[in-house]
Amino acid sequence: MQGLSLDARRLAGHGALVVVAGLVAGFFIGFVALGGFILDPLPSARFEFPGSERGWRAMHVGSILNGVMALTVAALIDRVVGTEKVRRLIVRVLTLAIWANTLFYLAANFAANRGLSPWDNAAGPGSLWGLVAFLPAAIAAGLTIWVMLLFARAAFSAR
């Protein structure tokens, strides 16, 4: 990856790993739908796979999109953001955010309230899974909006 700063390469690496997490979740959609590990012609094992089809689908699509966001920013950040300090801030926040969102999708799959809050809500009762899903993702959501606005401002400003 010649030409990319160390920060951009790190963000790209984390983005790629989050895409892998999303791709693995795609297998889990099938395991829930089929009732186990069934990949013909390989040996099969029927069992109750944890989570829901909806939850694994959310992790599949959401993690892939988060990874693509990170890869896109990594590809552009050195050309768009003029100062190393702002680049480093954006990279660190986005790295935190994509992993917090991946954790959200995973933990929300086991939370009766879909991880939309740590307490009871219209979707279901609160739980530790709900707290684990909600708290990091809620913090990361606000920070992500902030750094993406910084990125946008840098993109629209003349260097």
Image (cartoon, rainbow, N blue to C red):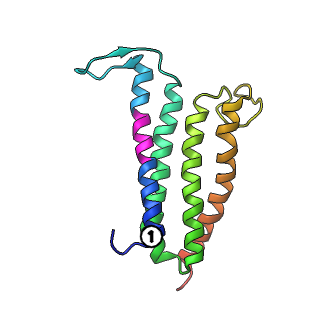
Q: In which quarter of the image is the N terminus?
A: bottom left
Q: What residue type is labelled 1?
A: Leu
What secondary structure is found at the residue carrying circle 1?
helix
Residue drawn at x 40%, y 44% as measured from the top left: 20
Residue holding disc 1? 6
Please tell me whether residue 21 belongs to the stretch shown in magenta: yes
Q: Is residue 74 left or right of residue 92?
A: left
Looking at the image, residue 42 lies above or below residue 74: above
Residue neighbourhood size for the residue with mark 1, other residues' Cα within 10 Å, grouped as few (<14), some (14–19), many (≥20): few
Most common SS among magenta residues: helix
Residue drawn at x 57%, y 46% as measured from the top left: 101
Residue drawn at x 44%, y 41% as measured from the top left: 22
Magenta span: 19-26
Residue 144, given in percent of the width and then of the height, sits at: 62, 58
Residue reaching furthest bottom?
Answer: 159
Residue 67, given in percent of the width and then of the height, sits at: 46, 52
Residue drawn at x 45%, y 70% as measured from the top left: 6
